[in-house]
């Protein structure tokens, strides 16, 4: 059975997406295991760039906050789905803060990957990434190309791959299709 971690960075659900997400997870529970984190309800500190997760306590952030449970879930998953509204042309501050804190999952040491310098793996296996951009205004979805490009690079740095970007105005139909194809 596939394991999926959902990291929900929606600050306020103005589109009804979360109710649709709950129904989708219920429909798929017989085939997949979901663990869903609503960042707005969690205590997560900003990365301060101290690099303690690489030097002082390898693989562990110095902050003992709720991010620990997200990282444990993510590294055990087959797919991590990041859900965010489009805020000023980018992902929400909640998703940005959480993705910055994924750095303990890799080593500080450098290796060559596809002709580029990247960090060495800390774990043997990493989950794929998926991105869902939720917005009630369809014209702000023009920002999805830039956001997708940034998260493709982030996935590469996490020794993974961004499988999909879904733009939604409140429906999970596109997300469900991507998960079925996964």
Image (cartoon, grey):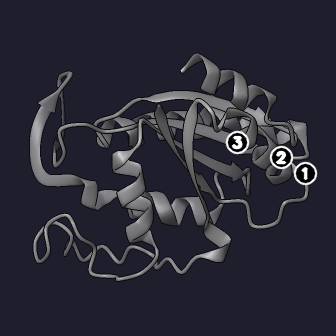
Closer to viewer: mark 3 or mark 2: 3
Q: Which residue is mark 2?
A: 135
Q: For the point 54% across and 81% down, which residue is it?
A: 43
Lower sequence index among marks 1 and 2: 1
Closer to viewer: mark 1 or mark 2: 1
Q: For the point 71% across and 28% down, which residue is it?
A: 176
Q: Estimate how packed mark 2 is, as few (under 14), some (14 to 19) or many (20 or more) residues with alpha carbons within 10 Å.
A: many
Which numbered disc covers residue 15? 1
- Name the side, left or right, on which 64 lies relative to 174: left
Identify the secondary structure beneath mark 1: loop
Lower sequence index among marks 1 and 3: 1
Closer to viewer: mark 1 or mark 3: 3
- Name the side, left or right, on which 166 lies relative to 153: right
Look at the picture and state if 160 lies above or below 82.
Answer: above
Q: Which residue is mark 3?
A: 25
Expressed as whole percent of the image width and height from the top left, the position of residue 18 reads 80, 53
Q: Estimate how packed mark 1 is, as few (under 14), some (14 to 19) or many (20 or more) residues with alpha carbons within 10 Å.
A: some
Q: Nearer the viewer, residue 121 or 157?
A: 121
Q: Nearer the viewer, residue 110 or 161?
A: 161
Give the spatial CA distance, label 1 vs label 2.
Answer: 7 Å
Q: Estimate how packed mark 3 is, as few (under 14), some (14 to 19) or many (20 or more) residues with alpha carbons within 10 Å.
A: some
Expressed as whole percent of the image width and height from the top left, the position of residue 59 reads 19, 64
Give the spatial CA distance, label 1 vs label 3.
Answer: 18 Å
Identify the secondary structure beneath mark 2: loop
Expressed as whole percent of the image width and height from the top left, the position of residue 145 reads 63, 31
Q: For the point 38% across and 73% down, which residue is it?
A: 47
Q: Quadrant of residue 118?
A: top left
Whether the residues at callouts 1 and 2 have beta carbons within 8 Å, the answer is yes
């Amino acid at each position: 059975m596939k394991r999926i971690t959902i990291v929900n960075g929606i600050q306020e659900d103005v589109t009804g997406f979360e109710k649709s997400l709950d129904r989708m997870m219920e429909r798929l529970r017989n085939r997949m295991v979901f663990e869903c984190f609503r960042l707005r309800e969690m205590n997560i500190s900003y990365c301060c760039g101290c690099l303690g997760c690489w030097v002082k306590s390898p693989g562990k952030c110095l902050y003992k906050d709720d991010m620990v449970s997200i990282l444990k879930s993510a590294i055990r998953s087959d797919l991590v789905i990041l859900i965010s509204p489009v805020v000023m042309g980018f992902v929400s501050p909640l998703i940005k803060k959480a993705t910055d804190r994924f750095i303990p999952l890799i080593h500080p040491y450098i290796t060559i990957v596809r002709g580029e310098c990247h960090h060495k793996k800390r774990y043997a296996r990493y989950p794929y990434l998926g991105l869902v951009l939720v917005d009630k205004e369809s014209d702000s979805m023009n920002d999805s190309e830039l956001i997708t490009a940034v998260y493709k690079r982030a996935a590469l740095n996490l020794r993974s791959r961004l499988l999909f970007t879904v733009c939604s105005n409140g429906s999970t139909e596109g997300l469900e299709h991507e998960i079925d194809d996964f």
